[in-house]
Amino acid sequence: MKTPVRPLALCLVIVAVSALVLGRAQAGGGHYFPPVSDPVVKEECGACHLAFAPAMLPARSWQRMMGDLKNHFGDDASVAPEVAARITDYLVANSADKAGQPYTRKLLRGLAASDTPLRITELPKWVREHREVSDREWRHKNVRTRANCVACHADAERGQYDD
């Protein structure tokens, strides 16, 4: 009696499609940073700017930043202590040195363990990848700042930075 091949073939097709879909969603061509999923972090941080993926900075950077919200890049971004604690815990738990994503490790290359950057744009990898962007392009009325990721990366809010 012959063993049916169909269930095995169907199983292989499902595995292949799943790997393709999940690989694309997670890898994002190598420039994927899981976007903020905590609703409080999204609301508080995203009210003024893109809620940057925590995997874009090391834990020590998020701790330093959250420790001085009265001086948040020229603004007072203070929140209630319990909200600040929740945001800090989330950012630290999902930071570049904790997240374990392949690209986050690449992003931290060249950063000394003693360095505590407060801006993603200060990371050596970020600087290298954006070195060909002219000063004129940075000053464009739709860009205006290096922190305006969505001006060039249409899917930045979904964690994709390949465009």
Image: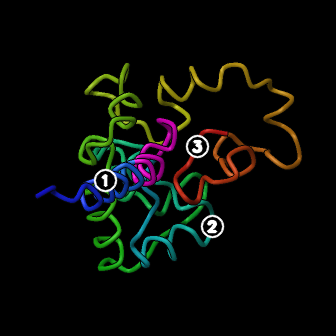
- Of marks 2 and 3, which one's residue comes earlier in the chain? 2
118 or 71: nearer the viewer: 118
Separation (CA) of disc 2 from disc 1: 50 Å
The crowd level at tag 1 (other Cα within 10 Å; few <14, some 14-19, many 20+) is few
Residue 64: % across, % down: 34, 49
Q: Which residues are magenta?
A: 20-32
Residue 73: % across, % down: 57, 51
Secondary structure under tag 3 reads loop
Residue at (49%, 71%) from the top-left corner? 42
Taking 115 as reference, is 140 left or right? right
- Of marks 1 and 3, which one's residue comes earlier in the chain? 1
Q: Quadrant of the C terminus?
A: top right
Separation (CA) of disc 1 from disc 3: 35 Å
Separation (CA) of disc 2 from disc 3: 20 Å
Residue at (42%, 78%) from the top-left corner? 40
Type of amino acid under label 1? Ala
Q: Which residue is mark 3?
A: 161
- Say which mark, if any, is on residue 9: 1
- Of marks 2 and 1, which one's residue comes earlier in the chain? 1
Type of amino acid under label 3? Tyr
Type of amino acid under label 2? Cys
Main secondary structure along the magenta-highlighted residues: helix
Taking 98 as reference, is 62 left or right? right
Q: Which residue is mark 2?
A: 48
Query: Is residue 133 located in the magenta-colored stretch of the structure?
Result: no
Disc 1 vs disc 3: Cβ atoms closer than 8 Å?
no
- Say which mark, if any, is on residue 83: none
